[in-house]
Image (tube, rainbow, N blue to C red):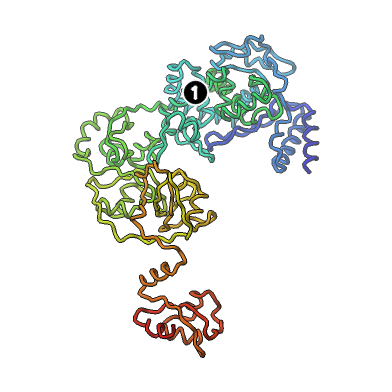
Amino acid sequence: MRSFVVTLLLFAALWPAPAHAEPSAHRVKQEATREASPPPDPQEPSVDEVVTSVRKQLLALVEQEGLRDLDDTHDDSATPDVAVGLPPDSMTSRAPETVHAPARGSKDLGWLEGMVLPDIPVRWDDRLVRTLEYYKTDARGRAHMRSLLARQGRYGDMIRKQLKAAGLPEDLSYVAMVESGYDPTAHSEVGAKGIWQFMTAPANEYELEMSRWVDQRMSPERSTEAATSYFRDLYGQLGSWPLAMAAFNMGYGALLRAMQKYNTNDFWVLSSLEAGLPYETIVYVNKIVACAIVGRNAQRFGFGDVAPEPPATTTTVAVPGGLQLARIARAVGIDADALAALNPELKKARIPPDVKTWQLHIPKDRLSRFKDKWPQFQPEAPTHRVHVLRLGERLSEVAELYGTSVSKLQALNDLEEGEQTHAGMKLLVPDVEPTIKAKADRPTVGIPGDLFLYVDRKRVFYRATEGDQLDEVARFFKITSDEIRMWNQISGDAKLHRGMYLQLFVPADADLSQAVVLSPDDVRTLVVGSDEFFDFHETQANRVRIRYRVKPGDTLRSLADRFDLSVGSIARINQFSRDKQLSPDSEIIVYAPEEGSKPGAAGL
């Protein structure tokens, strides 16, 4: 079937494709940025309509057969040309220029005459022209562009101002249009977030804070600062805006490998080669350029009447860390949800607790009211402090430390049902001095019988908590998972469970202040399986462990009755069947109540 589909695709590729054929859409991040492919031009020859229909059916088969990379069988970028008759030195532009566009062949491109170009390079090929036609003539494309141009009003000026201040092309602002439709709350299924759709790695590199309380990828201002720095660095490394935009989409490392493989630094050459660039990256760069051209020529495209959304007219006020937004919203005089919408980087309905003050956006026209009302709502003194959770520390222990309850801690920190805590998490706790209680009895820890001696390590014991992962514990203590398995009788395939103790031999200079660990003096160790081990645990249960020599006539039932056990218990202790016939003079083990130990002792 696969070879048949490929043959049909090659046949379709040799047949001239209609000029309106639209490349498959750029990766979809949310409904606001989803576009449909333009429909066929009704004025094209009927043979083209037939070819288009065949191509669509073949592409459906391609997706079913896993041949997605062959969907652009009409490779119009393989032979780039000056589609509108521009001289070679006009193929790119850093400053707004106008297009002189005579007709080419049988297709009238005169409507491009006098078009103002953006300040990012423009490559005139059929793909770009088709995209522009889509926004110019297709009802779906026009509706989509109208909504984008309207939303541009909210953040467009802020983005352009930052780009200009950094000496970058202002029309890079259309990257945000393509990435998210200017929606700061946009997020993708692969984890990209915000107007610029930052993934975690570049967000960390450009110092966008991501924590349980805040995600600055969703801050229009901060993420734009990061995007501006990112583009400045990409251009400095690549020296080409098409390459910089491609790297923003596919990653610098992946682009560099493609450039090295094909030995070229020309984006257009890479986009024309088999497997040169991801198809979505090729479409992505063309779409940014197309959107920039439409934005520069809104009137020419029939969008002159689009009313842009007003920019967010906000100002910032300093508020204490840890306060609930609802409290601040009452002082501002707006709904808490409206206040949260002005601060999309806040993940909880609360100011991050780990800051002394936070610059919060409020409507500019509410500043006077806020100043007047804030003294009524501002707490006179801090009501909480921050506790940094240590590895292995439980909420119940933190609650006891600060004289509160687990439920109050959960409410204070907006902890959702089933949400896992972890080392380094910053928790709000009552603003009281912690009460450190005397240590309870030493815990008893079962360990293997092997002896481990290290001159450059120290031995500690770590109690596992809910959600602990073996690899994460190993990384924290700067040891390996295999070592932990060697030092303890645990499997690497099963989960760690709360209450298990791990015997660890950590580097002598390891900082253990951020973990709950016990020293060898703080625990009692017993070799698992030893008599001492069993005797201890049965004593804790008020029982005596007895080695009983079987007498003639003894049965499991008679011994169960004698030692106040069940037949199943005796069978489990000795690891044999409930139906086992006991042999005289054989030895079994029974656990007898302390008061009933004498009858058993008589049988020793």
Question: Is any part of residue 335 visible from this angle?
Answer: no
Residue shown at 24%/49% (left/top)? 434
Residue shown at 24%/53% (left/top)? 403
Q: Position of residue 247 (x, y in %)?
A: 57, 26
- Circle 1 residue: 173
Q: Position of residue 109 (x, y in %)?
A: 67, 17
Q: Is residue 201 left or right of residue 522?
A: right
Front-lying residue, 18 or 248: 248
Identify the image quadrant of the N terminus.
top right
Is residue 189 positioned above or below 230 on the image?
below
Q: Is residue 421 left or right of residue 587?
A: left
Question: Is any part of residue 350 visible from this angle?
Answer: yes
Residue farthest to the bottom?
A: 553
* Mark 1 residue crowding within 10 angstroms, few (<14) / some (14–19) / many (20+): many
Is residue 469 positioned above or below 24 on the image?
below
Q: Position of residue 378 (x, y in %)?
A: 22, 38
Identify the image quadrant of the C terminus.
bottom left
Front-lying residue, 254 or 600: 600
| Local SS, label 1 | helix
Front-lying residue, 393 or 502: 502
Q: Is residue 265 left or right of residue 599?
A: right
